[in-house]
Image (cartoon, helix red, strand yellow):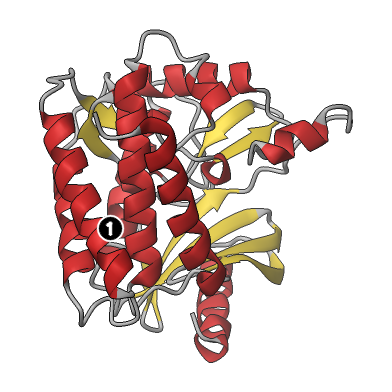
Amino acid sequence: MEPSEVRRAVDAAAATASALGLQVGDAVVVHNSDRIAVRLTPCDVLARVAPLSLHDGRGQAGLEFEAEVARRLAETDSPVGELEPRVEPGVYVRDDFAITLWTYYEPVVADRRGAAAHEQLGMSSDLAPADYAHALVRFHASLRKIDLAAPHITARIAGWTASADDRELTPDLPDRDRELLSDTFRRVSAAISRWGASEQLLHGEPHPANVLNTRKGPLFIDVGTCQRGPVEYDLAYVPDEVAEHYPGPNQDLVHQFRILMWAGVTTMRWNRNDQIPNRDYWRTEALNQLRAALDRYGLD
């Protein structure tokens, strides 16, 4: 969000929490993209705020879906970040913003021995690969216990493909890179369709930024990306060392999904409407990661 919109969104989150009886003395933005996350203190609540004008599935409808997924999972003893229990669960609307309120978890930081190695893997809060994988196994088991209408991963892949091919949506994408993305989507999608892997509900993006190391153990957040597909799709988002600790996946399929994942991330970063911080850096980095994955895993 732009600074002026961020200020309005923060005020809307604080006012909503206060109106619900929560004590709010300060509000700090902890993440800013097309939506923001705001820590409210001293009530220690995390507010997720989206403009009502968002129509890409991440506005009010996206927050409603995310809240419903979290509510269902909380009933299964899932390792998932929970909605704030002191207020009614759901989406609140104020001043052109949709708002959900969540429990804020103070991150656990272990001693710094070995921390550098974890950071090089892109992992947060010194979370060990085996612990990360075990939490994801539990999370997937919980998803198998709930009945929820969720999009199939093919819908997302189709959206990425259309965006890469649409010069109006990705006007700055160089022709050479556009051709690389289109070819990758076509070839990897064809390769994946031949595997016939079993499917279930997935997190959709269980990367290190979406798993917290807390006093309750690892907890997954940002569950609004929930989709249906093979578990190998989720494993493409975690570091190799984590995927290797997950029992039973087809690692060749994980590698194919990892190529697809980097192609999708690249496409999102080149979308003209993308608001992720450091977007220019991630445009280049995602392309580099895609080329590295293609070199490493190939398309056979």
Q: Quadrant of residue 140?
A: top left
Going by the image, does 241 lie left or right of 273? right
Q: Quadrant of residue 248?
A: top left
Q: Nearer the viewer, residue 168 or 24?
A: 168
Number of numbered discs on residues: 1
The amino acid at mark 1 is Leu
Q: Quadrant of residue 42?
A: bottom right
Residue 138 position, x and y percent, is: 44, 17
Going by the image, does 220 lie left or right of 249? right
Which structural element holds mark 1? Answer: helix
Considering only vertical position in the picture, is 52 above or below 155?
below
Residue 246 position, x and y percent, is: 46, 15
Residue 17 position, x and y percent, is: 55, 65
Looking at this view, name the residue that lies furthest to the top.
248
Residue 72 seen from this side: no
Label 1: which residue? 180
> What residue do we see at 50% from left, 27% from top?
79
> What residue do we see at 27% from left, 19% from top?
145
Going by the image, does 273 lie left or right of 292? left
Residue 14 seen from this side: yes
Q: Which quadrant, please, contains the C terminus?
A: top left
> What residue do we see at 33% from left, 47% from top?
225
> What residue do we see at 24% from left, 49% from top?
184
Considering only vertical position in the picture, is 220 above or below 178?
above
